[in-house]
Amino acid sequence: MLFGHGDDFYNSQSEIKINFSSNVWHGANLDKLKVNLIEQFDKLTRYPEPDAAQLKRLLARRYEIKENNLVVTNGSITAFYLLAQAWKGAKSMIAVPSFAEYEDACRLHGHEVSFFSTSDDLAELSLEGQDFCWICNPNNPDGRLIHRTELLSLIAANRQTKFIVDQAYVAFTTEDMLKPTDIYNHENLIIVQSISKAYNIPGLRIGYLIASPAIIEEVNKYIIPWSVNAVAIEASKYILIHPAQFTLPIRKWQRETAEFIYQLSKLDGLEVIPTATTFFLVRLKKGTAADLKQYLLSKYGILIRDASNFRGLDETYIRLSTQKSDENQELVNAMKEWLEQQ
């Protein structure tokens, strides 16, 4: 889905003043990171390590795992395509609605694809004959969350199936999530995470997958040398070495999200879907997501995510990521105005 994602900032013909469409932490202070990258500029005159070894070492130390449990990738999305490629023709079951690239990666590499709903009772889920189960947790686009104990029980009960758990939004909740060390008790678990979401650097494209050495060895057969560039490596190293500079105030952001949802819920003509994160779905009871998106963009310079292209959703769904309080209120006012015109 090359052009089917949320943040189509690059494609807008109008000035975008507020961006609700991208699920990243908007308040990250990148000043010191910027200075560091300028100081590291000369590294662009040399090839980076073929496998981002220094960054891998830092990640292993942070998560108390071994380096042979890690693959650093050009964004977490690359990890999905590598996994699908390494097991061409496998049988994959995907939770929906969710990130479209799981399905796209699987179909590109000849997987037999089936689906289950994120609202299904996991205890009743049948994975017989399935090679892979793909789960986004917390889930994009609805912010639904499977608690760690429930997810580990599912993984333990289906050892014949490899579970690819996308934790790109692990920093966007205070709930108990899978830990990298969980792979030692569950060899069929693959955790994929992103460095960019919590630090507002999605343009750098940096992510990683964590799994057993056997799985890592298979994935490494398909890694392209130098697939992670020097700027992304240096930025990620700086963030890992200076974590205090990049603390995401998740509880404050959650309070702002709760207030945002409360204000939206007072509007006639829409339904806010409950979430465990700082982003959420809204179902329009009148009008379409495409029309609302165009209205907000052309009149107010506000960009939202038309969520109609998520499998399982339709043209009435939008996704919003909480911004600053005054910006949230500006969107509430603009949506109220639009709804009154429908």
Image (tube, rainbow, N blue to C red):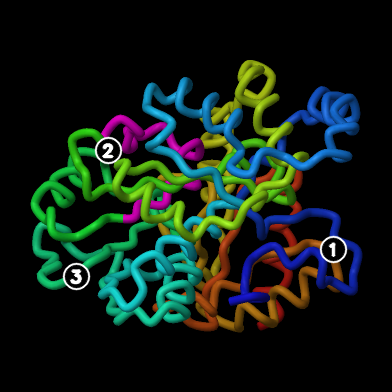
The tag earlier along the polypeptide, 2 or 1, is: 2
Place of residue 253 in the rendered image (x, y in percent of width and height, measured from the top left): 58, 35
The residue tagged 2 is 183
Residue corresponding to mark 3? 130
Between 26 and 156, the one lying in front of the other is 156
Task: Relative to 333, say whether 156 is above or below.
Answer: above
Report the side of 163 relative to 230 (left or right).
left
Residue at 55 percent across and 59 percent down: it is 78
Q: Nearer the viewer, mark 1 or mark 3?
A: 3
Say few, some or many: other residues with alpha carbon within 10 Å of mark 3 (under 14 / 14 to 19 / 20 or more). some
Name the residue located 43 percent from the left edge and 66 percent from the top edge.
98
Calculate the distance from the C-alpha at mark 1 to the C-alpha at mark 3. Answer: 45 Å
Give the amino acid type for the residue marked by disc 3 in the picture.
Gln
Q: Is residue 284 visible?
A: no
What amino acid is labelled 1 in the image?
Answer: Gly
- N-terminal of the two: label 1 or label 3? 3
Choose between 130 and 308: the one closer to the eye.
130
